[in-house]
Amino acid sequence: MKDNKLEVGDKIVSVVSIRWTNFIDYNFDEVERLTSTQAITKNGIRLKNEGRLSWADNKTIKFKEHKSGYDADNYQLVTDKILQDYNVEKHKQKVSNWFDKQKFTFEQKELIFNLLNNNNAS
């Protein structure tokens, strides 16, 4: 990125809260080509190639989808912190999905309950 403009090869991500859950969705992409006003990604997303400071932290430079007015359609450059957060989020979702698919017996529920409450007595 140079002068708040994306360049071909820049790795970008849209980070969005998933409605009705406590999860976050990460949509990774890469800038494939540029026009005079847009950056087009490998997934066909057209971004205004004019980065603006995020109102949330006043540090992150965000890029809006070309025809969108929604904040959820903002992209930013991928950073080590975003990759770290993404890996934590992936693990949270994996654990949650595993528990959602399980059918625990009462004995298994009791074991989990006792483990979580540090209580070995019934």
Image: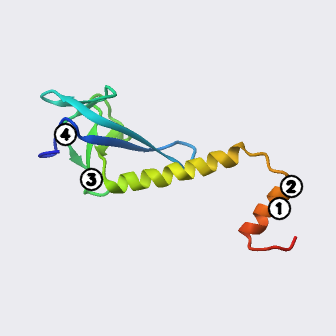
State the residue position of label 1. 110
Q: Quick one: SS at disc 3?
A: loop
Residue type at mark 4? Leu
Is residue 106 visible in the rendered image? The answer is yes
The tag on residue 60 is: 3
Q: Give yes or no for contact between labels 1 and 2 (Cβ–Cβ under 8 Å).
A: yes
Residue type at mark 1? Glu
Residue 84, compared with residue 5, is above or below; it is below
Real-space Cα separation, disc 3 to disc 4, in angstroms:
14 Å
| First of labels 4, 2 by sequence position | 4
Crowding at label 4, few (<14), some or many (≥20) Cα neighbours within 10 Å?
many
At horizontal 66% and vertical 47% (from top left) the residue drawn is 98
Tell me the quarter of the image containing the N terminus: top left
Image position, residue 12 (x, y; %): 30, 41
State the residue position of label 4. 6
| First of labels 3, 4 by sequence position | 4
Real-space Cα separation, disc 2 to disc 3, in angstroms:
48 Å
At horizontal 30% and vertical 33% (from top left) the residue drawn is 65
Q: Give yes or no for contact between labels 4 and 2 (Cβ–Cβ under 8 Å).
A: no
